[in-house]
Amino acid sequence: MYTYLDRPATVSLANRNRGQRYVVHAHQVDRVATFAYIHELASPVIYAPSADHPKFEIKTEKAVVYGLYAGEAAVTADYAVYDPQNAANPHLFSDQGSKARHLAVVLNQYEAAKILGEPFSTSADELARKIAEREGAEVVVMKAGPIGALVLYQGHMTFVPSYQTSYVFKIGSGDIFVAAFAQGWLEEGLSPHDAAERASRATAFYVQERRPATAQELREFRPSPVPVGEKNKRHVRDGGDRAKVYLAGPFFTMGQLWVVEEALRALSALDLEVLSPYHRVGPGEAGVVVKADLDLLDESDLVLAIGDGMDAGTVFEVGYAKAQGKPVVFYAENEVGEDLKMFQGSGCHMVRHFATAIYRTVWEAMAL
């Protein structure tokens, strides 16, 4: 393992590596970058590293290379798996002098579009082929969020699904995908498609259990793929309408409004059209806002309801949506017992964790 370490990071890594399972080659620096998250889907607060990060020059047979927030690494390998790992300023594998005879690039659509200078609306298929051409990559795995991933190998594109879980812990999930893919492709000789499929299952296990799976656990883990309905197939194939989610919830205090804003941002980032009455209609007299809110509900495909506080308007909107047969995800961390009985009994998807509520909403939308 080649990395940068400051004093706290050295102690942390030593504690994780007590069995001496791997050899660490480190450049000691004054301060490494650190990250803090308000919740798993939030943009992290990044505490800047010190400027003195000398460049790594590495020659090896096989390598897994993560893009660095600070510092540089020039890697020469026979086989390499590369993940840019830098949403703000992603780089190509070759930008810092790295090269490999057999290269697999694993990245998401946003990173690919930013690297290539392409519009973010460019299809995943087109982005993957352009990355392969630019880098001379043998394999490109293009992660497409809740839909799954596309695997480009020898000019042929295959699809790997993502999987539903009972809980979603997102921090570190991308690292797990890359590590599991590399284990399959580099070490076990799996095809790129099979390595990516197992990586998707390994990621599902991680986000559900908040730890990596053992080999035995992964062999026995059989989650359900996220279903993709006709509406979403049309959207992916030819740019048809996205699924529309009505965002129900109170917005009368700063805390309530913050949750609404975070939910809007997270759902939009996952390619849903969000019909938020706060943003589309706003506050006002009952004779004005109620009809406008209900018109948005009629237009929606499903509902995410923020239930903490049991706001009367939100409760009414949930009942209205259920009467129309729309799926409802009910997110509440603090409500218990009798207050939840009607929602549980009417078939709402009950969730107590924010990131899980967002992904449950996306999975329900994907099935349309």
Image (cartoon, rainbow, N blue to C red):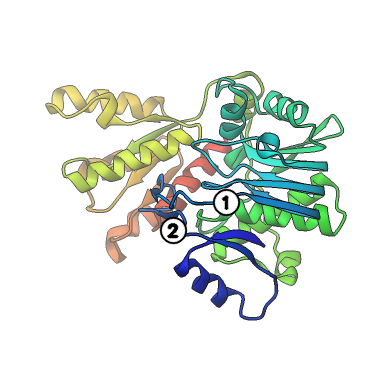
Residue holding disc 1? 54
Q: Is the residue under label 1 in contact with that under label 2 (CB below 8 Å)?
A: no
Q: Which mark is residue 257?
A: none
Is residue 320 something one can see in this rendering?
Answer: no
Q: Earlier in the sequence, mark 2 or mark 1?
A: 2
Expressed as whole percent of the image width and height from the top left, the position of residue 131 reads 71, 29
Q: Residue furthest bottom?
A: 19
Judge the density around disc 2: few (<14), some (14-19), many (≥20) Cα neighbours within 10 Å. Answer: some
Q: Residue furthest left?
A: 285
Q: Nearer the viewer, residue 270 or 59?
A: 59
Q: Nearer the viewer, residue 343 or 9?
A: 9
Question: What amino acid is labelled 2 in the image?
Answer: Arg
Task: Find numbered disc 1 in the image and state the secondary structure of the residue it sits on.
Answer: loop
Residue at (59% x, 61% y) in the render: 206
In this rendering, the answer to whether 348 lies above or below 257 is below
Judge the density around disc 1: few (<14), some (14-19), many (≥20) Cα neighbours within 10 Å. Answer: some
Q: Nearer the viewer, residue 96 or 286?
A: 96
Expressed as whole percent of the image width and height from the top left, the position of residue 297 reads 35, 30
Q: Is residue 28 left or right of residue 246?
A: right
Expressed as whole percent of the image width and height from the top left, the position of residue 85 reads 58, 45
Q: Is residue 171 left or right of residue 367?
A: left
Q: Which mark is residue 31?
A: 2
Residue at (56% x, 75% y) in the render: 14
How far apart in space, not on screen, are marks 2 and 1 (Cα)? 13 Å
Q: Is residue 173 left or right of residue 290?
A: right
In this rendering, the answer to whether 129 lies above or below 362 is above
Residue at (42% x, 29% y) in the render: 300
Question: What amino acid is labelled 1 in the image?
Answer: Pro
- Res 172 → quadrant: bottom right
In this rendering, the answer to whether 123 lies above or below 228 is above
